[in-house]
Amino acid sequence: MITIALFALVLRIVVQALISRTMAQNESNAEDTLKNISAALENFAKANNESYPENFSDLTRPQPPYLDRNYPAISPYKGYTYTCSRLEPSGYNCTASPDTCNLSGSMHYSVTAGGGFVSEACSNKE
């Protein structure tokens, strides 16, 4: 009985460590990806008379592309879902949200025109 209890305790510690490590990797990747999306949008605007694209294909289609993949279309990607609630010539607002709060990630990230970056903790009440 004691052996089973000890095994369960060790297993719980190992699983918790794995989840924490995966969340940290997902969060780091989401932050980097959102910053890459912002950089691609800003570079597009610089090349197009300060006008942002109206859709993501304008970022992935040119050769060389501004961005390697259409993240909103392939979401979820590495534990996060990417959306752009506003993508128009005058500006943008894009977000990265964990698929499951406190399992795939614990932070929401958003970026706006001009490169403004914000992060906030997610909650299980979503």
Image (cartoon, rainbow, N blue to C red):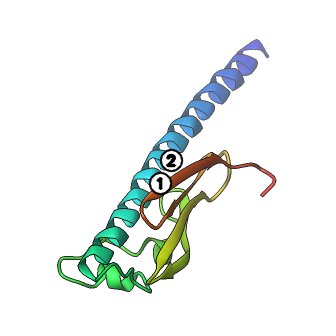
Amino acid residing under circle 1 = Ala
Please tell me which residue lies in front, 114 or 76: 114
Q: Nearer the viewer, residue 34 or 44?
A: 44
The residue positioned 42% from the left and 64% from the top of the image is 114
Q: How many marks?
A: 2
Using a 10 Å C-alpha cutoff, classify the residue at mark 1 as few (fewer than 14 neighbours), some (14 to 19) or many (20 or more): many
Residue in the image at 31% along x and 79% along y:
60
Q: Which residue is mark 2?
A: 27
Tell me the quadrant of the picture where the N terminus can be found.
top right
Tell me where residue 55 appears, x and y as whole percent: 43, 85
The residue that appears at 55% across and 52% down in the rendered structure is 118
Residue furthest toward the top?
A: 2
In the rendered view, would you say 28 is above or below 58? above
Name of the residue lying farthest toward the front: 49
Marking on residue 30: 1
Amino acid beneath label 2: Glu
> How far is disc 2 from disc 1 in space, using C-alphas?
5 Å
Q: Residues within 10 Å of mark 2 (few under 14, many from 20)?
A: many
Residue 6 horizontal side relative to residue 31, left or right: right
- Residue 29: image location, x then y, percent: 43, 51
Q: Is residue 104 visible?
A: no
Residue 108, how many percent across, how many down? 60, 53
The answer to whether residue 17 is above or below residue 35 is above
User: Mark 2 touching mark 1, by CB under 8 A?
Assistant: yes
Q: Is residue 10 above or below residue 28?
A: above
For the residue labelled by badge 1, is the local secondary structure a helix, a strand or a loop?
A: helix
| Mark 2 residue element | helix
Q: Can I make out residue 48 in this image?
A: yes
Q: Residue at x 58, y 39 (%)?
A: 19
The residue closer to the viewer here, 54 or 102, is: 54
Q: Position of residue 21 (x, y in %)?
A: 51, 36
Query: Is residue 58 rendered to the left or right of residue 89?
Result: left
